[in-house]
Image (tube, rainbow, N blue to C red):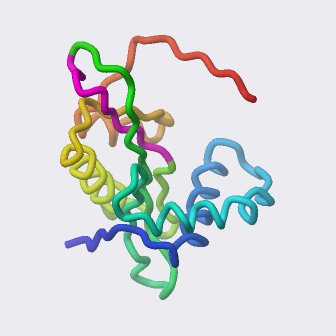
């Protein structure tokens, strides 16, 4: 049985380390200087157990003080619509497993906890962006490809 727990403020540096693992999987050699600036805000978010931000983690079985896996999500309000009259939706990001802890079910276990967290708060659906390597996991959990085009503007 995998012990999944809610991340706390003391986990912030490890959360950032695993986020970098995820970033490096799609953009190898990405800079890491952003982590120092992100750390205080992340600690504050992790210290809010009733907020709209949640991270679920598994402690690394072979390295004390390290995390093996991480899943992070936010609960967002958007004006209601068909299938989501309450307007709440979940957004999943920063799904990462330490390279030496992969293929043990840790990411799936963390995702299960995050999905339950979304359900308990009334999210009508959950969104995420899947890498080609991770898509089979999400598909096995019931996620489907979104047909709505997405656009982005960096400010």
In terms of image quadrants, where is residue 56?
A: bottom left
Left or right relative to 42: residue 109:
left
Picture coordinates of residue 91 (x, y %)? 41, 38
Determine the residue positioned at 47% across, 65% down. Answer: 46
In this view, the residue in front, 68 or 79, is 79
Residue visible at 60% across and 16% down in the picture? 151
Instruction: Give the magenta range.
Output: 83-93
Above or below residue 122? Residue 154 is above
Picture quarter containing residue 89?
A: top left
The front one of 46 and 31 is 46
Q: Position of residue 44 (x, y in %)?
A: 55, 65
Task: Give the percent coordinates (x, y) of residue 58.
Answer: 37, 70
What residue sits 43% from the left and 64% below the top? 48
Taking the spot 73% from the left edge, 28% from the top edge, the residue there is 154
Residue 47 percent location from the top left of the image: 46, 69
Q: Seen in the image, is 47 located left or right of residue 109?
A: right
Quarter placement of the C terminus: top right
């Amino acid at each position: 049985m995998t012990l999944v727990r809610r991340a706390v403020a003391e986990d912030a540096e490890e959360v950032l380390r695993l986020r970098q693992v995820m970033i490096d999987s799609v953009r190898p050699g990405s800079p890491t200087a952003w982590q120092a600036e992100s750390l205080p805000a992340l600690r504050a978010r992790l210290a809010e157990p009733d907020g709209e931000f949640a991270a679920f983690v598994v402690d690394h079985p072979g390295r004390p003080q390290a995390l093996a896996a991480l899943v992070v999500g936010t609960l967002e309000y958007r004006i209601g619509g068909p299938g989501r009259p309450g307007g709440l939706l979940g957004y999943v990001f920063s799904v990462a497993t330490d390279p030496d802890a992969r293929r043990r079910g840790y990411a799936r276990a963390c995702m299960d906890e995050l999905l339950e967290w979304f359900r308990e708060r009334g999210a009508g659906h959950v969104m995420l962006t899947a890498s080609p390597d991770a898509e089979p996991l999400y598909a096995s959990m019931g996620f489907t490809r979104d047909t709505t085009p997405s656009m982005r503007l960096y400010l």
